[in-house]
Image (spheres, rainbow, N blue to C red):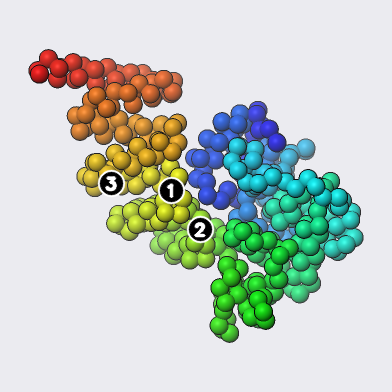
C-alpha cells in the first residue's frame, strides 16, 4: 500500500526497528508518522500489541480511528516501506465466509488474525494454510486460552520460521501456551520442558512493561523487564539495545557496551546500535574506536546525519581536518537545516589544511 501523502500511526512497535528508523522509512516513502491515531489515514499494527487483543478480536487502540482508515499488519508495513517481509499469499480460494463457517471464528477475529500476520492471505484470497491456522486458533480458544495469547504464540512461532498451521499448541496446567512434541511439553522455540511449572508471559509483554517503566523513570524496573524480555526472545536486537540505553543512563558504561555489542551481534546492520556504541566510546576517550563505530553507522545508513556529524566533529578534535572536510560537505549538501554551520566548519577545515601545507 503506497504511503505517499499519508499520515501513519504506529500501534505498538515494529520488531527490530527503532522509532527513529521507522520515521525515516515512512518519510522516505512519502508519508509522515503521527502520534495522534485518530488523525491517521493508515494504522500499522505492531506484533507487540497482540497480547492486548480481546477474545472477540478487538484491537485495544485507545482511540476511534477516522472513517476509512486503512490497517496494515506489521509485515504489510514492512513491504510498504521497502523492507523485505515476504508477500501476502494471493493463491488462496477461500473467502472470509468460508473460513467463518469452517473454523467457527467470527469475521472480526479472522480480520485480527490478518492484522497480526497469523493468516498470510488477503480478505478475498485465503488459502488452505490459513484454514488450518484458523482452526488451530479456534481449538485453543475452546480450551480456554485467550485470543491475545494465541496470536502472541503464533507470532513467536513465526519469528522462529515455524507456523501455527504446522505446530500443535496446547495450554500447560500453569497457563503458558506451549508446543506438544511427541506427548511432551516444549516451549515455542522447541526446547523441551521438565514437568514443572513456568511463567505465563511472552517477550512482547515483558518489553512493553520495560518501556512503561522506562517512560515512568523507573530504570531499575526497566532493566529487569528488558533482561527478562531478552531471555524470552534471543533474536530481537531492539531488546539489548534498549537495555543498553537504560544501563548507560544508570552510569554502567561497561555493561551498556556489552549490551550494544549484543544488539549488533543479533543484527550487524543495526546503525543505531553502532552510533550509540560510538557515543559511549567517545565519552570514554576511545576516539579511534568511536570513529570506527560512527563510520560503520553511516556506512550502513548513508543518510544518518548524527553519525556523520559526530565523526566529523571528532576528526576535527583529532586535528584530522582533511578527513573531516568531506563529511561537513556531505552534511551541508544533505541537510538544509544544518547547512550554514556545516559550511562554516568545512571552511575552517580548509583554512587548517591550507595552513598545514604552508608550514610544510
Q: Earlier in the sequence, mark 2 or mark 3?
A: 2
Q: Position of residue 325 (x, y in %)?
A: 29, 23
Which numbered disc flags the more N-terminal residue, 2 or 1?
A: 2
Is residue 133 placed above or below 76 in the rendered structure? below
Q: Disc 3 designates what residue?
A: 281
Residue bearing the label numbered 1: 268
Asked which quadrant contains residue 144, the reply is bottom right
Residue at left offset 69%, top offset 38% = 42
Residue count near mark 2 (Cα–Cα under 10 Å), binned few <14, some 14–19, many ≥20: some
Residue 153 pos. (x, y %)? 65, 64
> Residue furthest toward the bottom?
195
Determine whether 274 is above or below 198 in the image: above
Residue drawn at the location 86% of the way across and 52% of the way down: 94
Separation of marks 3 and 1 at Cα, in angstroms: 18 Å
Q: Indicate the secondary structure of the residue bearing disc 2.
A: loop
Q: Nearer the observer, disc 2 or disc 3?
A: 2
Image quadrant assignment for residue 339 = top left
Counting residues from the start of the chain, the first of labels 3 and 1 encountered is 1
- Residue behind mark 2: 235
Amino acid at each position: 500500500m503506497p504511503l505517499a501523502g499519508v499520515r501513519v500511526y504506529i500501534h505498538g512497535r515494529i520488531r527490530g526497528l527503532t522509532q527513529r528508523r521507522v520515521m525515516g522509512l515512512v518519510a522516505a516513502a512519502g508519508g509522515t508518522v503521527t502520534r495522534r491515531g485518530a488523525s491517521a489515514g493508515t494504522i500499522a499494527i505492531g506484533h507487540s500489541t497482540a497480547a492486548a487483543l480481546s477474545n472477540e478480536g478487538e484491537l485495544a487502540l485507545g482511540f476511534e480511528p477516522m472513517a476509512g482508515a486503512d490497517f496494515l499488519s506489521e509485515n504489510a508495513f514492512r513491504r510498504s516501506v521497502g523492507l523485505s517481509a515476504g508477500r501476502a499469499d494471493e493463491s488462496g480460494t477461500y473467502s472470509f465466509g468460508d473460513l467463518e463457517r469452517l473454523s467457527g471464528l467470527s469475521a472480526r477475529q479472522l480480520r485480527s488474525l490478518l492484522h497480526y500476520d497469523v493468516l498470510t492471505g488477503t480478505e478475498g484470497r485465503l488459502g488452505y494454510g490459513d484454514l488450518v491456522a484458523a482452526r488451530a486458533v479456534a481449538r485453543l480458544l475452546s480450551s480456554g486460552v485467550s485470543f491475545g495469547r494465541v496470536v502472541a504464540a503464533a507470532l513467536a512461532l513465526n519469528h522462529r520460521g515455524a507456523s501455527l498451521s504446522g505446530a500443535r499448541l496446547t495450554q500447560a496446567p500453569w497457563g503458558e501456551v506451549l508446543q506438544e512434541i511427541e506427548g511432551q511439553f516444549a516451549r515455542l522455540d522447541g526446547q523441551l520442558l521438565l514437568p514443572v511449572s513456568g511463567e505465563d508471559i511472552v517477550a512482547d509483554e515483558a518489553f512493553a512493561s520495560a518501556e512503561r517503566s522506562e517512560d515512568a523513570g523507573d530504570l531499575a524496573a526497566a532493566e529487569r523487564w528488558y533482561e527478562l524480555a531478552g531471555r524470552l526472545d534471543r533474536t530481537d536486537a531492539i531488546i539489548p539495545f534498549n537495555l543498553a540505553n537504560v544501563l548507560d543512563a544508570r552510569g554502567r558504561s561497561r555493561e551498556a557496551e556489552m549490551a550494544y555489542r549484543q544488539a549488533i551481534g543479533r543484527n550487524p546492520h543495526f546503525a543505531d546500535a553502532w552510533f550509540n556504541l560510538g557515543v559511549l566510546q567517545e565519552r570514554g576517550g576511545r576516539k579511534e574506536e568511536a570513529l570506527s563505530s560512527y563510520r560503520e553507522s553511516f556506512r550502513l545508513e548513508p543518510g544518518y546525519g548524527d553519525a556523520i556529524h559526530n565523526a566529523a566533529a571528532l576528526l576535527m578534535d583529532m586535528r584530522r581536518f582533511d578527513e573531516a572536510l568531506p563529511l561537513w560537505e556531505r552534511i551541508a549538501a544533505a541537510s538544509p537545516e544544518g547547512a550554514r554551520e556545516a559550511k562554516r566548519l568545512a571552511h575552517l577545515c580548509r583554512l587548517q589544511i591550507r595552513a598545514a601545507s604552508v608550514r610544510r
